[in-house]
Amino acid sequence: MTNQPFLSERLQGFGTTIFAEMSALAERTGAVNLGQGFPDTDGPQEIAEAAQQAIRDGHNQYPPLPGILPLRQAVSEHRARFRGQHFDPDGEILITAGATEALAAALLALTGPGDEVVTFEPYYDSYAAGVALSGATRRVVSLRAPDWSFDPDELRAAFTPATRVLLLNSPHNPTGKVFTRDELQLLADLCCEHDVIAVTDEVYEHLVFDGEHIPLATLPGMAERTLTVSSAGKIFSFTGWKIGWACGPADLVSAVRTAKQFLTFVSGTPFQHAVAVGLRLDDAFFSGYTDQMRAKRDRLCNGLAAAGFDVLTPQGTYFASCDISSLGEHDGRAFCLALPERCGVVAVPTMVFYDNKDVGAHIIRFAFCKRDDVLDEAIARLATLNR
Ligand code: PMP
Ligand code: GLN
């Protein structure tokens, strides 16, 4: 028997992600799972068919390190079509094992002990782990319910001489916030003033229901210092395929590629071919998808409100939040752990994504990327809570 602790010091406290914990809870109790954000309906058949065709065509060995050229070209075309950004498929685009790998590789490549990473809390859980793995330190700025605003002075104070990276997620998981142009301008000004690199997680870029998705890289002075990250998982409802990408200036992408080659090296050849097909679908597919998810947002939010919940309607993403204070509840984690037993629904406590637990203790998150009958069943169960 060894006396060595198995988990390294850098990973202390990271245990099992809340999504895995909550999915296991849903499985164990048979509760309706509105916890982990994955769609329960697959994406377009023609994309799935393209993956099968790629396997039949023999695209089954390692792809090139930066990803197959047709996918890099399709990413480039997609960024130009929807965002007015221009990236050279040869050197400015890197295909990754989901956005998760792009973000981890970026943090490992760009930061180390003594460096600081500024991000907003609540943050997507892999951010804290990625920063910890690189040995850097996170500096969080709080987004506060109900409007998910932040204090500009708190943001300014988070930038120090040690700041190396701003890690921004918009549309934002778990709050559903879509950062405004004014907010992005302040972030851009701070990045330029402090010579900081921005890493932007835009996986929900096609899930904006109110307002507009503005990539930080499109603000003046930012293209040269921004790594733009996105993923097919959330755009096409194939979260298990894990095809993501990172775009930016060639030297920045090259640094990320150096780290990435020792994480997975490469992955998902046939899926890369299929995602290239998906990114070239016509505009009607993308707008139709947004409309479909907006309808689900409205279905869940209206249902939750009718069931007596204090709903914080999101502008984007797959997630709606509720403030449970009005139910007389103040500990979101305890509330979510008890919810399957109380009424057969799984939600995620937003407080686990805060360093300052008090700020988010009363907020919980529901995923609405589910079939309408599943949403209706969850709402009906949640309505029984106070009876
Ligand atoms: N960033 C955010 C904000 C997410 O919600 C997720 C989960 N989809 C990811 C990154 C990870 O994306 P992927 O599955 O492509 O690794
Ligand atoms: N992005 C998904 C969510 O926020 C979860 C992905 C995961 O389980 N890591 O719910």
Image: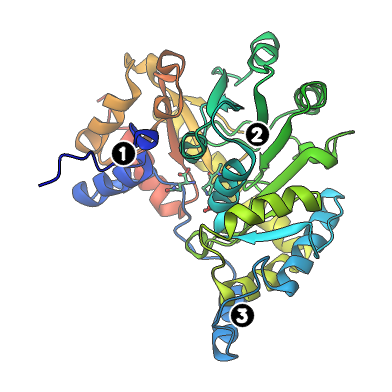
Q: Is residue 195 left or right of residue 154?
A: right
Image quadrant holding the C terminus, namely: top left
Query: First in sequence: mark 2 or mark 3?
Result: 3
Q: Is residue 133 left or right of residue 332?
A: right
- Mark 3, ligand 1, within 8 Å: the answer is no
Disc 3: which residue: 50
Q: Residue at x 39, y 28 (%)?
A: 352
Q: Is residue 177 above or below residue 103?
A: above
Mark 1 Cα-neighbour bin, 10 Å: few <14, some 14–19, many ≥20: few
- Residues 152 and 6: in front is 6
Disc 1: which residue: 15
Mark 2: which secondary structure? strand
Mark 1: which secondary structure? loop
Q: Position of residue 127 (x, y in %)?
A: 52, 37
The residue mark sitting in front, 3 or 1, is 1
Count of residue discs: 3
Quadrant housing residue 114: top right
Q: Position of residue 328 (x, y in %)?
A: 32, 13
Q: Residues under labels 1 and 2: Cα distance?
A: 24 Å
Disc 2: which residue: 168
- Residues 37 and 254: in front is 254
Quick check: marks 1 and 2 in contact, CB under 8 Å? no
Q: How is the structure coloured here?
A: rainbow
Q: Amino acid at mark 1?
A: Gly
Q: Amino acid at mark 2?
A: Leu
Q: Residue at x 72, y 65 (%)?
A: 279
Query: First in sequence: mark 3 or mark 1?
Result: 1
Q: Is residue 188 left or right of residue 276?
A: right
Q: Residues under labels 2 and 3: Cα distance?
A: 33 Å
Q: Amino acid at mark 3?
A: Ala
Quick check: marks 3 and 1 in contact, CB under 8 Å? no
Query: First in sequence: mark 1 or mark 2?
Result: 1
